Amino acid sequence: MKTISTSKSHGGIQGVYAHASEACACDMTFAVFVPPQAKDGPVPVLWYLSGLTCTHANVMDKGEYRRLAAELGLMIVCPDTSPRGEGIADEKDNWQFGSGAGFYVDATEAPFAKNYRMYSYVTEELPALIAQNFPADMSRQAITGHSMGGHGALTIALKHPERFKSCSAFAPIAQPSTAGWSKPALEKYLGTDEAAWRAYDTTLLIEDGKRFPEFLVDQGSADGFLQEGLRPWLLDDACKKAGIRLILRMQDGYDHSYNFISTVMDDHLRWHAQRLG
Amino acid sequence: MKTISTSKSHGGIQGVYAHASEACACDMTFAVFVPPQAKDGPVPVLWYLSGLTCTHANVMDKGEYRRLAAELGLMIVCPDTSPRGEGIADEKDNWQFGSGAGFYVDATEAPFAKNYRMYSYVTEELPALIAQNFPADMSRQAITGHSMGGHGALTIALKHPERFKSCSAFAPIAQPSTAGWSKPALEKYLGTDEAAWRAYDTTLLIEDGKRFPEFLVDQGSADGFLQEGLRPWLLDDACKKAGIRLILRMQDGYDHSYNFISTVMDDHLRWHAQRLG
């Protein structure tokens, strides 16, 4: 693991790191905020998964999480959203596939299966690296994310309810297997057999019996992707049928940007801190 | 004036706007955050002047001012740091001069005098535009800034003590006329007669009798520009001699980045809000 930069912020350290990833077969960059409480021992970890087109840097720059994370004693880990670099299959002009659009799946189709293994990366390889290199209490983890990363957070929590004390999402893609901006990606990463997609679709995972105790979801009412891409009502339906507690808050007038995320960030950090103990 | 974008944030509106500037003889872009209190009437205005290489966007993205500005009812205006565009004299490979490095002066030397009139722009033209187009209470203004913008804020406050209720700065350039990264710029903008530089140098303005009641200045101790470029002790000396109250806080371990600025941003917003009434 290589340190790209560290900078003191709100009493903690905001760092950026890189390492040779086995899962993605390329160098991967990620950001970690270590709160000041870490000097007294391991601190709980909140994973933040970013949305389409983002790197580790967007939420680090615009998410406004450090002030309260420093107060609450939360480590914030922000992975990249895909493998990147020369020799990695990509569609340069398509922002909904390839670089910046890993969708937190393990691709099974050539040529993407070689590198696009973001599910293994964020659920296995990176957690192991974090546990080894940072003052993280891995028995206290939580997960959140935005848009494609909200989809990532919800699906990963449903498949690892024993690992995460809490899960929330900002404007998540509720049902990626039927949304226009994600269905073509799932087909290319996972093949045409839609049965394989179910493992990466929040609503279908719930339909298939996966459970998580409760979700906090915020969604802006002026979000341009609301009707076609995000559709939180599908998550609401799925949770109601399954008896999962969903706090779905429609936020009047907010769009899909970090201006929305940063506005509700404090609420999400408190939600997780309460459950992380 | 043209609206580039607006986005709801922390209950207010973060907007980006452009207009044809007469002072700079080019299109200029700026950011304004209007807090929710503006629906009940004009709100006080805090000017934030940015540092070298920045545009209006850096503090908008990374400054973390909106949460508390929305709570305190402050409008935040963030100008660009120089004229920009084709046909504008520049030194492309020099980050300390030209684009992104206007130093808040009115250039008198050709070819820069045609466009590099940032002093007139931020003290006359843009305030008039703000007064005309936004719910701003121009009888309640305050000013702050970072690095080159801290220099801008301090010099402008000293020359307009009647206009500003308060002034603060983040890691300001205390004496630009003798610092390596600013002296060559002053020479190119203002000519070789150093007498002309005094009007744009905080310590020399104080020496020449300009006064402002008090300044709040934060400075990171791990700032790589501290010893050569910023030198807050020169400001401290000047203020002591002149009887100006200076609260100079050395912040242990902080660098020159927005991680530092955002850490102390709340304190500055409260400082200004208290004095704006």
Image (cartoon, coloured by chain):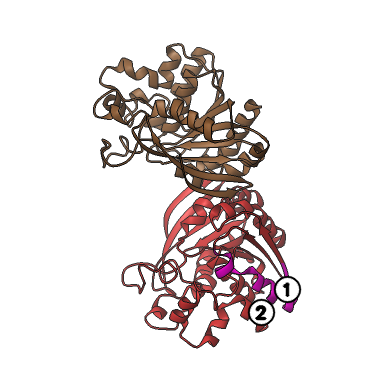
Chain colours: A red, B brown
Q: Which residues are magenta?
A: A225-246
Task: Name which of mark 2 and mark 1 comes first in the sequence.
Answer: 2
Residue drawn at the location 42% of the way across and 73% of the way down = A24
Residue A52 in percent (x, y) is at: 48, 65
Q: Is residue A210 left or right of residue B120?
A: right
Name the subunit of mark 1: A
Quadrant in which the C terminus of chain A appears: bottom right
Q: Is residue A90 left or right of residue B218?
A: left
Q: Secondary structure at mark 1?
A: loop
Q: Main secondary structure of the magenta part?
A: helix
**Residue B226 at least partly seen:** yes
Quadrant for residue B189, please give it. top left
Is disc 1 surrounded by few (<14), some (14 to 19) or many (20+) residues within 10 Å? some
Give the residue at mark 1: A244
Say if A147 sits above or below B169 in the image.
Answer: below
* Front in this rendered view, residue B253 or A46: A46
Quadrant in which the N terminus of chain A appears: bottom left
Give the residue at mark 2: A206
Residue B241 in percent (x, y) is at: 49, 13
Residue type highlighted by circle 2: Ile
In the picture, the disc for residue B48 is: none
Quadrant for residue A92, please give it. bottom left
Say if A203 sits above or below B67 in the image.
Answer: below
Q: Are marks 2 and 1 in contact (CB under 8 Å)?
A: yes
Residue type highlighted by circle 1: Ile
Residue A36 in percent (x, y) is at: 59, 49
Residue drawn at the location 34% of the way across and 23% of the way down = B177
**Residue B218 at least partly seen:** no
In the current view of this chain or complex, which residue is farthest to the top? B209
Residue drawn at the location 61% of the way across and 39% of the way down = B69
